[in-house]
Every structure is written in C-alpha cells, then in structure tokens.
Amino acid sequence: MSAKGAIILLAHFGRPKGEPVADQSLSLIAPAVEEVLDQKVAFASDCIGAPAADAIAKMENGDILLLENTRFHKGEEKNTPEFVAELAKNGDIFVNDAFSAAHRAHASTEGLAHHMPAYAGRTMQAELVALEKGLGKPARPVVAIVGGAKVSTKIDLLSNLVKKVDALVIGGGMANTFLAAQGINVGKSLCEHDLADTAKQIMIDAETSGCAIVLPVDGVVAREFKAGADNETVAITAIPADAMVLDVGPKSVETINGWISKAETLVWNGPLGAFEIAPFDTATVAAARHAAEQTRAGKLVSVAGGGDTVSALNHAGVADDFSYVSTAGGAFLEWMEGKELPGVAVLIAEK
C-alpha cells in the first residue's frame, strides 16, 4: 500500500442467475479473505448503488472492501453497458487477477477494462507467462498429455494440439475411442464409437503436421469399476470382450515416460486412467512423478491444468514440483484449444 490506495474487491460465486441467493453471498467468504490477507476486510451488501458507494466513502488508504457477488445482477453475465457503468463508478484503476474467469466476456472480467486503465494482476501475469512457455513460444520438443473420459469434450483441444506439439499422448477413456477407430475391440470400455471418423481425422491431421500420436499398447482391465477390483494387464489388442480398460499398462507408461524424457516442454490436461480408484491410478502417478523429476532436474518446463489434472497431481504428490499448475478449468482448456480469452484480449487491446 505504499502508493496510498484503497482496494475494492469484485468477485462472483456460484450461479445465482442474476438474483440474490443467500447461500451464494460473498459475506460468507469475507472471514476467509481476512484470514488470507491478514487484514480487516469490510463488506458491502451490493456491488453497485448506495451500499457500495457508502462503503467506499468510508474507506481510508490501505483499506480493503469486498463487494457483494457480481452475479446477483443480470448485467454481469450479459455484460450490459448500464451495469458496467455502475461498476465503473466504484474505482479508478481496474486490475484483473482472475484468469479462471478470463474466458467469459462478463462485466467484471471484460467490460470494466473499457472504462478505466486496466492491468493484469500478478497471479494472472504468472499464469500468462507460464502458458506462453507452454504453447506460445515453447522450447521444443513439446509433448502434450491429454486424458479424460470423452473425446467429445475435447475435440477442439485435440485438433489444436496436433498442430502445435511434437507428440500427443492420449489416455483415459478417450484413448479407447481412438483405438476403436483403428479397429481394435475395446470390450466394455468407455468408448464413443460414433466419433470414430473424428478420431481418424485428428490422426490424419497429426500426421500432416508431423505430430506423433501416442496411444496405449497395453492396458489394465477389470470386470467391475471399484477399488481393489480383480484386474489384469493385457495387450491393447487382447482386451477381453467382458472387460473394460481402466488404466494404461506398464509398457505404455514406459513409452510415455520416454517421450517426457525427450521433451523440453510438457503440457498436461487429464489423467491417463481412473486415478480416483486404486489400483487404476498407477500410470497417472508414474508419469506425473517422472515429469516432476525431469522438472526438478531443470530438464523440463511442465505446465498442467484442469480440475481432474490438479487432483491427479496432488494425488501423486507432485503438484508443487511442476513448473506451473493452473487451477483455471474452462479458461485453461480454452487456452489449450487456441481460443481467444476475452478477459485477456481486452487488457492487451486497451494498452
């Protein structure tokens, strides 16, 4: 606070659909904000109008004020000029430190930047620097690991990555769709058979771009999805008709770790198997720990993000060892898809 300013905090919580909802009030988190900042934080019962204005009028240099949930107003998500103008009355400089909401063109993420000097906060700055190292101007070779349940949720992501990375490792349930597209019988495994043509096109695009597609060569299969279920490791071409693949096997992990060892940059989104249930966490943990080891040795820039990914890295005990772990779900995914993020684009445009 050496510049003698007062800080006014804007935030949203939940999906109240433009109406006040008691259990989504930011008053509930004000004590936690105080604890984190180790400073008294005042609270205003609205983010615009008299409640906000009166609370701001009482502020002195060094004070911090938390305004009520911006999503209690329909103008927030609609980014209406009228609501933006009301928000803009509350301050002189706009600092956006919410990369996790940067993929939304809302009043408090995009609109305000048109009304006053606008800057990225330190947290957003760190995220953007890390992402630039990941896919913007990465050291090569670049390897991407993409896992998760369904190809349908990550078509744009896969289509973008094959044009930007040297190798794309596909794991999780989505690997089964690619395997099935190659004529491999995946038994009762999670698989989107109707996306076979999409998977084939992604593989064609990868070949055109010189991107290696790395699919499992073996898998850990079981007849039921539960902790400690009887399981066996089989070649990916020998999956029993009554079994499902719940993790990639040791030969696949060896191949994946080989690619990680070759890489200068690693981008990771999604687990390799059903990591939430032992023993189907083995491959994800092994690959994560190898990536962490390479990172600690100064041989790898590792950038990871997405809710399941963060959980998986924490489960493996290596989240702190990666170069950067993003907690932004949708924004991180859209960045990996190559899409423009309105909350970031406006900060650049307004300079």
Image: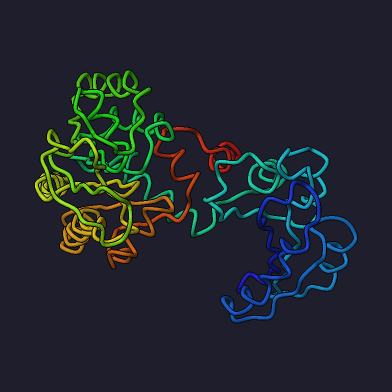
Q: How many marks?
A: 0
For residue 237, above or below residue 100 = above
Q: Position of residue 226 (x, y in %)?
A: 33, 57
Residue 259 is at least partly visible in this image:
yes
User: Taking 117 as reference, is 86 left or right?
Assistant: right
User: Taking 15 as reference, is 163 left or right?
Assistant: left
Q: Quadrant of the C terminus?
A: top right
Q: Position of residue 95 (x, y in %)?
A: 61, 55
**Residue depicted at x 66% and y 44%:** 113
Q: Nearer the viewer, residue 325 or 279?
A: 279
User: Taking 7 as reference, is 132 left or right?
Assistant: left
Residue 351 is at least partly visible in this image:
no
Which residue sits furthest right? Answer: 50
Indicate how the structure is coloured in the image: rainbow
Q: Position of residue 19 (x, y in %)?
A: 80, 51
**Residue depicted at x 66% and y 57%:** 13
Q: Nearer the viewer, residue 60 or 275?
A: 275
Q: Residue 315 is drawn in which quadrant?
A: bottom left
Q: Position of residue 166 (x, y in %)?
A: 20, 34
User: Taking 150 as reference, is 121 left or right?
Assistant: right
Q: Nearer the viewer, residue 209 or 14?
A: 14
Q: Nearer the viewer, residue 144 or 42?
A: 144
Q: Residue 239 is drawn in which quadrant?
A: top left
Q: Quadrant of the N terminus?
A: bottom right
**Residue depicted at x 37% and y 33%:** 151
